[in-house]
Image (tube, rainbow, N blue to C red):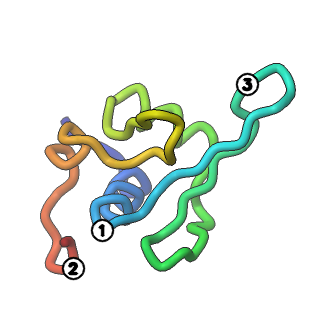
Amino acid sequence: MDISRTEQRILHLLAQGGRIEISRNDSRKIENARCFSRDGWLYPGFDLLLFRKLKRLKAISSKAGRPYRITERGLQLVRAELDNR
């Protein structure tokens, strides 16, 4: 399955130890999603639509209320790069 270049960048960032944090409004709906690198830098090209697409592909998941991380499925989708860990 092919994924877009933007999705590929996010999955690379997550494979290197990044995380996705979400914030919810008063009615418990997700209103904002932010992607951070393992060094704590905010990735600017990440939005709620991209978050929902990665979640629908089951490339990311969250357990016990923790930030979203890459899954085994996400690791299969991401193409190998030299700087991936």
Q: Earlier in the sequence, mark 2 or mark 1?
A: 1
Quarter of the image containing the C terminus?
A: bottom left
In the rendered image, which quarter is residue 12 located in? bottom left
Name the residue carrying label 2. Answer: 83
- Can you tell which quarter of the image residue 34 is in? bottom right
Q: Amino acid at mark 1?
A: Gln
Q: Is residue 45 above or below residue 3?
A: below
Question: Mark 2 belongs to which amino acid?
Answer: Asp
Mark 2 neighbour class, 10 Å CA radius: few under 14, some 14 to 19, many 20 or more: few
Tell me the distance, in whole angstroms, between the alpha carbons under discs 1 and 3.
28 Å
Q: Position of residue 68 (x, y in %)?
A: 46, 45
Q: Which callout, 1 or 3, points at the residue further toward the start of the chain?
A: 1
Q: Residues within 10 Å of mark 1 (few under 14, many from 20)?
A: some
Residue 59 locus on image (x, y percent): 32, 38
Q: Secondary structure at mark 1?
A: loop
Say which residue appears at 53% left-offset and 36% top-offset: 65
Q: Indicate which disc residue 45 carries.
A: none
Q: Which residue is tagged 3?
A: 29
Does residue 76 lie above or below 63 as drawn?
A: below
Q: Which residue is mark 1?
A: 16
